[in-house]
Amino acid sequence: MIYKERMTAKMEGDFVVFLIGMRINKPLMVHKIVPVFAAMPKMLKELYKQPELGFIHHEMWFSRTIILLQYWRSIEQLLDYAKRKDSAHLPAWKAFNNAIGTDGTVGIWHETYKAGTGTYENVYVNMPAFGLGKAAALVEAKGDLKSAKDRLKL
């Protein structure tokens, strides 16, 4: 469904925006790239099956640099998942370090941001539910939600 009106997403309480990705530096090294790429879908499947882990939603973009945008309920839950011995993350991390490490074939990166009331804003026009608008409640951006300044409560 495309929302033609101006919409904004409202998340109850604090949440975490986690950006993670990989960059293909040596495209001909397919045998090293594919396992890194294939690790994330396993983790996402695991996370969607276990909402109690704190994962909320994701979006993904593909190019030479692959970007995965994730929303989490808390930093603690994100960090706990990363360290869980029974999760898909630790074996993938160990496999990356064993197969690639610092050889330059594939770059990996992440950024983590904590957000809460008054620290974020967004607007969507002529868009389906997307990003935070898919992870949280979408409401019409009118009244005290009409402008970015108003959404930030500035």
Image (cartoon, grey):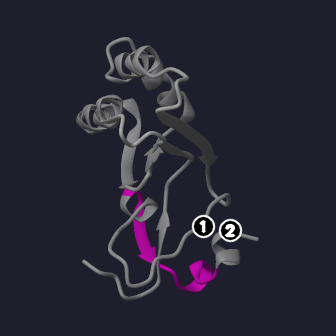
Element type at marker 2?
Answer: loop
Q: Quadrant of residue 7?
A: bottom left
- Residue 4 at what x, y percent from top left? 36, 88
Residue drawn 29% across and 81% down? Answer: 2
Provide residue 110's location: percent of width, then percent of height: 55, 39
Marks 1 and 2: CB-CB under 8 Å? yes
Q: Which residue: 38% across, 23% down? A: 89
How many residues crowd around disc 2 within 10 Å: few (fewer than 14), some, or many (20 or more)? some
Mark found first going from the N terminus, 1 or 2:
1
Q: Amino acid at mark 2?
A: Leu
**Which residue lies under the disc numbered 2?**
152
Is disc 1 placed on a helix, strand or loop? loop
The answer to whether residue 18 is above or below residue 123 is: above
Looking at this view, name the residue that lies furthest to the front: 28
Determine which quarter of the picture holds residue 96. Answer: top left
112 vs 98: above or below: below
Question: How far apart in space, not on screen, are marks 1 and 2 (Cα)?
Answer: 6 Å
Of 17 and 50, which appears nearest the observer? 17
Q: How many residues crowd mark 1 within 10 Å: few (<14), some (14–19), many (20+)?
A: many
Residue 137 left/right relative to 151: left
Residue at the limit of the structure toward the right, as seen here:
154
The residue under the point 37% across, 49% down is 57
Q: Which mark is residue 121?
A: 1
- The boundaries of the magenta stretch are 135-147
